[in-house]
Image (cartoon, helix red, strand yellow):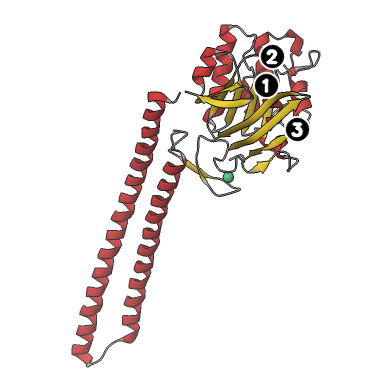
Amino acid sequence: MAGLKDTVSKSFTAINLKKNNFVTINKINTYISTLEHEISSLYSRMGTNAYARWKKDGGFDTDQLNEFCEKIREKEEEIARQKARIQEIEEEENQILGRNEDSGEEIVGRVYCAFCGTANSDQYKFCVKCGKPL
Amino acid sequence: MIRVEGIRKSYGKKAVLTNVNLSLETGEQAAIIGRNGCGKTTLMHIMAGITKPDAGSVSYFGHNIFKEKRTVAKYCGYLPQGDCLLEELSVQDNISLWSGKSGAPSGELTDFFDLKEILKVPVKNLSGGMKRRVSIACTMVGWPPVLLLDEPTGGLDRYYKAEIRELMGRYRALNGILVIVTHDEEEIKTCSRCFELSGGVLKEAT
Ligand SMILES: [Zn+2]
């Protein structure tokens, strides 16, 4: 009974979801490369400053070095968080596309079930997994 | 999701259902078809927890309706054949009877079924199609994720049939599961799956 309509609608689900995620992931990746640039710039400034200090006094300013290192670590942590976000989106995509292969519903906006945490389309009133109201 | 497994039911010596299995996911609409007297209504009664089967189980979202008392009330709305209304009472009072809550029904329900204009009208003054709409609204007061409708468009004219089909489509779009007993070709076409009950077993028709 499914026929062409369902097949088409199913493909749309996948395309829409993948397109949305693609855009989001691209944005995150741009942000990550900005952070990586900032880290490079911090390395370079840290080196330049350290060398200038050594040349002048024959030693290093530990406080200043610590400050640079801390900033670098902050950026590294932010990169890790953003990468985790990408992974989460990709995992979710697989989960949703896997789960909705049969129903062929379009998933664009998403809401999470308050009872079981499953991702659902924001068009839904009932959770796909536990049936409770969303 | 719905899981019906190994349902058997006999009345005296007459076996009505011998081994019924059915599995449905959210957003699916299943038509149950079959000759009169083949046991469709018995199956609906069992799925609605009204009749106990001799063997087998029915579960909604992993909750067995015969083991967990509140499962049917929480997960399932059932519309018996014909209407389920008290003619003398207003639409609002009929809905209150089903929900157990006095006063006007939720705006969500009123909007979904377009009841605003007829809330205070006695049911006896309504047309057949409107009555059916109110009946389905009654079964949906608690917004159950599963609806069992026994001939939801039976006895209605074309116009009202289309209206009820549209209603069912909107419920399905909310990700609800619909199981309908029907003889109506148009209605069968709107279903994502179709099952024929014959000889006490359910077979998926393609
Ligand atoms: Zn849930």
| Residue B63 image-quadrant placement | top right
Where residue B203 appears, as percent x and y from the top left, is 55, 26
Precedes in sequence: disc 2 or disc 3: 3
Q: Quadrant of ligand 1?
A: top right
**Callout 1–callout 3 Cβ contact below 8 Å:** no
Q: Secondary structure at mark 1?
A: loop
Q: Residue at x 72, y 29 (%)?
A: B9
- Check disc 2 and give the amino acid type: Lys
Q: Residue at x 74, y 33 (%)?
A: B54
Q: Secondary structure at mark 2?
A: helix
Precedes in sequence: disc 2 or disc 1: 1
Q: Chain of mark 1?
A: B
Marks 2 and 1, how far apart at CA:
26 Å
Task: Give the vertical position of B133 relative to A67 (above or below).
Answer: above
Q: Does any atom of ligand 1 lie closer than 8 Å to the CB of label 1? A: no
Marks 1 and 3, how far apart at CA:
14 Å
Marks 2 and 3, how far apart at CA:
29 Å
Q: Is residue B200 left or right of residue B204?
A: right
Query: Looking at the image, is mark 2 or mark 3 nearer the viewer?
Result: 3
Residue B39 image label: 1
Residue B67: tell me if it is visible.
Answer: yes
Residue B117: tell me if it is visible.
Answer: no
Residue B52 image label: 3
Q: Nearer the viewer, residue B68 or B107?
A: B68
Where residue A45 appears, as percent x and y from the top left, is 23, 75
Badge 2 crowding class, 10 Å Cα cut-off, few under 14, some 14 to 19, many 20 or more, is: many
Residue under label 2: B131
Q: Is residue A99 left or right of residue A87?
A: right
Q: Residue furthest top?
A: B157
Task: Give the vertical position of B34 relative to B59 (above or below).
Answer: above
